[in-house]
Amino acid sequence: MYDFDSIIDRSHTDAVKWLPAGVSRPAGWPDVIPMWVADMDFASPPAVIEALKRRAEHPVYGYSRKPEELLQAYIGWMRNRHGVGIEHDWLSFSPGIVPAIAIAIRAFTERGDGVAITPPVYHPFRNMIEKNRRTVFEAPLVIRDGRYAFDLEALDAACARSKLLVLCSPHNPVGRVWNEDELRAVAEIAERRNVIVFADEIHADLVFAPNRIVPTINLDEKLQKRLISGWAPSKTFNIAGLQASVIIVPDAGLRTIFALESEATGLSSPNCMVPEAAAAAFNQGGPWLDEALLYMRGNYELLAAGLAEKAPSIKVFPLEGTYLAWLDFRGAGLDGDVGAGVMNRAGLWLDAGTRFGTGGRGFARMNLGCPRSVVEEAVERLGKAFG
């Protein structure tokens, strides 16, 4: 029903993905394929496009109030899609998950305090901690039986020295969808160490069967008392540029502190185009998402099978959630700056694993939210370069 095969020209839209600053394209590769930053090259759901057109037709683009329509749509989405009841009072708006993480860092920690992360992990986590003059404590993930897992002993040690844990669920970049037992183990550590948990669940709707997202909000009543959860339509419906996120804080005390810090930043109000478009995504975007998930799962299967045949030295990790494949190039002789190596040899623009911190050397992240023909070409290029 939806067209995910067409190539859409984004080269004249100021798209970061296609025109990143400070990077030159290597000689001999006039057509480098950008498969790095996490937005899709698909057209957004028709309902979103129509909502934006309707709003744009009104000639006044003034200030917007709290986006009530978006919050109600999100409550309905959580109830209908995930079977989770969300109280309206728990919700607030943020232009993004990263700003909300920064707000949580400033609200619940002081300069020099520890904040725990589980690398290799989305690099803005570390950036926000360090730029706010807090101390990063790492609990690096471990690989067991070909899949990533928490090192609970290391996580306990990191949380013992921290006031806040930034959790990534599903995990970006390794593609894990944490199961209930894994998340309960994390919640137990947070309870015992008296650590507040910020759960970045921006990819929670991008999960491939038979895996199932376990929303942290629905996990444990004890966790709810120390939980801040960030969801958004941005990755789910490819509207990251609209900058809309929903922050859930069940505990009234934490909610008051978070709200005060949010107000202090001036980031608590949306632009006037956001509410109707984001609400349309949650209210009418489900069928589009279902087809997009099937399509991107096909992209992953094509990548995994193609590299197994054409470049078996490159290991593809199982993709349980997100549309971001995690590739191990160490067997192909790349153990440093994988990004530059892959660009120079294959003409592919991937995210170097070193961006994601400890455990990232020799790895790269590949965006599969693109037409199938792009993945086919990427497999061919990697086969020629590393086969």
Image (tube, helix red, strand yellow):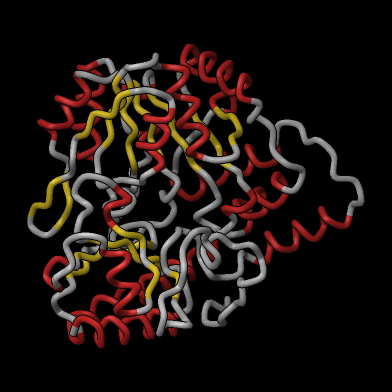
Q: Residue 36, percent across and down?
A: 41, 63
Displayed quadrant of residue 158: top left
Quadrant where the C terminus lies? bottom left
Q: For the view shown, which residue lies furthest in the front direction?
A: 27
At x 7%, y 57%, the residue is 145
At x 20%, y 55%, the residue is 361
At x 34%, y 42%, the residue is 168
Quadrant where the N terminus lies? bottom right
Total marks shown come to 0
At x 52%, y 61%, the residue is 20
Q: Residue 14, percent across and down?
A: 64, 62
Nearer the observer, 204 or 29: 29
Q: For the view shown, which residue lies furthest in the right direction?
A: 59
Q: For the view shown, which residue lies furthest in the left direction?
A: 145
- Left or right: 376 in relation to 77: left
Q: Residue 79, percent across and down?
A: 51, 42
Residue 221: tell me if it is visible: no
Nearer the observer, 37 or 155: 37
Q: Residue 163, percent across and down?
A: 31, 18
Instruction: Name above or below for residue 157 compared with residue 76.
Output: above
Instruction: Name above or below for residue 383 compared with residue 202.
Output: below
- Left or right: 310 in relation to 215: left
Nearer the observer, 265 or 144: 265
Residue 112: tell me if it is visible: yes
Instruction: Name above or below for residue 160 compared with residue 187.
Output: above
Displayed quadrant of residue 337: bottom left
